[in-house]
Amino acid sequence: MTVDLHRSDLGLPAGRSYSAVVAVLRDDKFNGLTYAQDHSLPYFSISTGPLEIAPEVLAVAHRPNASPVVLASHFFAGTVALAVLQAAKGFGRVDSIHLRAVQAEQDIGGPAALSDLARWATVSSAGLVRRDGVFTWVLDTATDITRVDGTTLAADTVAGLDIPGLAFATGAANVQVDFAVSESGTEPPTEVRIDLEGTDPAGTSLHTTHALTHDAGQRPLTALGIALTVERLLGLRGAQVPPGVHTPESLVDPAYATQRLLEVGAKFVELEPAG
């Protein structure tokens, strides 16, 4: 089957039926979204960054009852956000979320992923954070990341849907995501450190640090993120998803996602809190 993104009918044979539209690469004309809405199909997208989601959001605003639309240009298609929510289950209140992600230079992805990154960098080089409840664009993004093995890498504070998604999912007043690229051959090639601060259910101060890693890099994590949300959209797990705008962390159970992460070879462990 060949899909033509320049055609409103996607070049698909008339009379054929489909279960969903999954956009894993850039669809400049959003014909895939229009096709999904025209046919009342769920739509899933991982290619639009935080400054690019306006067409998808407004498409839903103009046709609110047409289709469920999932925006998932999160780290690894939402698996990191779901791991954060699982780590936060022991908290009564979450005040701060700080993610530090590392990928090997040869593990960023293929041509479509590199094109997305280049486009996002052109749109804005600023990072997005939440500080004291205020979403703020940060122009000086330079920072560093200390890996689990103790090595330090130059990094940048970045913008992504994880920031507002986790802020609203947890109520955390402070959310930040830092990202670094390491030389290929370092182990593990993909690593995300999750620092949470807040209080436990009794009101006592609580600080936890978790690490999410995979020895095969980001690809199995991203693939799983796509599969988990599409599984939900197809009605294979959970109730039917209603029309409207959704995200992976608003649809998928974090405990179930964590179980599946471990099944695909990821490691998700609690560490001693960072100093």
Image: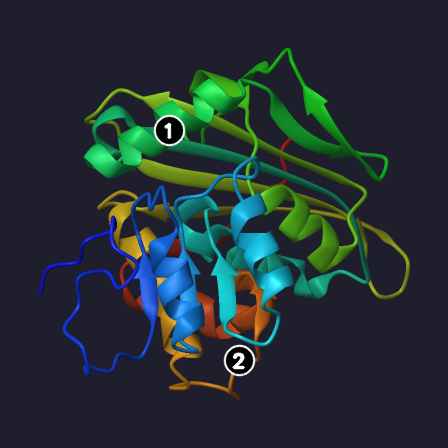
Q: Position of residue 142 (x, y in %)?
A: 57, 12
Q: Is residue 161 above or below residue 252?
A: above
- Residue 33 can be seen in this image: yes
Q: Is residue 55 above or below residue 158?
A: below
Q: SS for tag 1?
A: helix
Q: Residue at x 91, y 58 (%)?
A: 203
Position of the C terminus by quadrant: top right
Which circle marks residue 241 in the picture? 2
Q: Position of residue 57 (x, y in %)?
A: 59, 54
Q: Position of residue 128 (x, y in %)?
A: 65, 30
For residue 17, side relative to residue 58 (left or right): left
Q: Amino acid at mark 2?
A: Val
User: Pointer 1: what residue?
Assistant: 117
Q: 98 and 7: which one is in front?
A: 7
Q: Residue at x 45, y 56 (%)?
A: 79
Q: Position of residue 262 (x, y in %)?
A: 35, 64
